[in-house]
Image (cartoon, grey):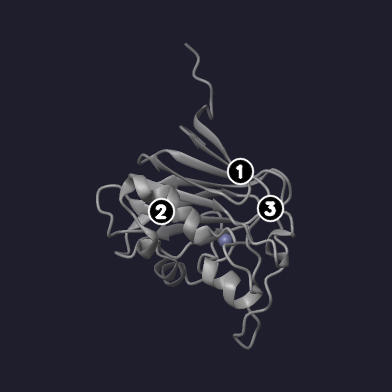
């Protein structure tokens, strides 16, 4: 029987502003697509067999010697183990510096109560794995365009460079729990003032 290349094992649309959690096995590939473009996807990962080990943006930055990640990079855990390899990246502009947006961010900076936010999205999605709000690791912010100035200050985040259908593909190097949040930040240019869907797919080959 012919085996169809890049057959999708599990495809899901994560509606704009919401989150999802699921598992991926060692060797499988995860494709994350910005369906309509200019949508930030916060991305976290926690080891399935040791929930104290998770994707660490700090360790990833220092191991790669760069502020961002792109094709060919490995992503590292807080124990400095390799968790992923980035095998494709059609954008090349992502953020490793910003934490998840949370209710306090909208309260302090915009005087808005009960705004949807990535941290609550993760806490809700990861509850079934026993991971609660206090334990959500800092995310890799896919498609987020938040440049750093030459003097070390942050430039204001601006619209993502991602166009409709742009994507990133990761190969999992161990068994992992994945969390993805389509960021609901609609009060700055971060997501182009238009919150849209993110698609995730697990594929066997790439
Ligand atoms: Zn967010």
Query: Which residue in the protein does label 2 denote?
Result: 45
First of labels 2, 1 by sequence position: 1
The foreground one among 175 and 114 is 114
* Vertical position of residue 177 compared to residue 60: above or below: above
Q: State the separation of the CA atoms marked 2 and 3.
A: 23 Å
For the question of whether residue 73 can be seen, the reply is no
Does dot 3 land on a helix, a strand or a loop? loop
Query: Which residue in the protein does label 1 denote?
Result: 15
Residue at 49% in and 47% down: 170
Q: State the separation of the CA atoms marked 1 and 3.
A: 9 Å
Q: Position of residue 202 (x, y in %)?
A: 48, 36
Mark closer to the observer (2, 1): 1
In the picture, the disc for residue 195 is 3
First of labels 2, 3 by sequence position: 2
In the picture, the disc for residue 28 is none
Left or right side of 74 for 94:
right
Q: Position of residue 19 (x, y in %)?
A: 52, 49
């Amino acid at each position: 029987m012919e085996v169809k290349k890049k057959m999708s094992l599990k495809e899901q649309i994560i509606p704009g502003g919401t989150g999802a959690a699921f598992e991926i096995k060692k060797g499988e590939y995860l494709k994350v697509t910005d369906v309509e473009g200019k949508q930030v996807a916060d991305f976290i990962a926690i080891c399935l067999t040791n929930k104290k080990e998770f994707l660490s943006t700090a360790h990833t930055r220092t191991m790669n010697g760069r502020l961002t990640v792109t094709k060919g990079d490995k992503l590292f855990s807080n124990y400095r183990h390799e968790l992923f390899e980035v095998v494709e990246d059609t954008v090349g502009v992502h953020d490793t510096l910003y934490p998840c947006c949370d209710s306090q961010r909208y309260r302090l900076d915009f005087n808005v109560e009960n705004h949807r936010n990535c941290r609550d999205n993760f806490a809700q999605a990861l509850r079934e794995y026993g991971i609660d709000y206090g334990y959500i690791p800092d995310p890799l912010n896919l498609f987020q365009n938040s440049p750093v100035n030459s003097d070390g200050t942050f430039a204001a985040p601006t619209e993502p460079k991602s166009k409709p259908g742009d994507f990133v593909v990761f190969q999992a190097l161990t068994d992992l729990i994945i969390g993805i949040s389509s960021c609901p930040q609609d009060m700055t240019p971060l997501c182009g003032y238009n919150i849209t869907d993110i698609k995730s797919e697990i594929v066997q080959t790439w």
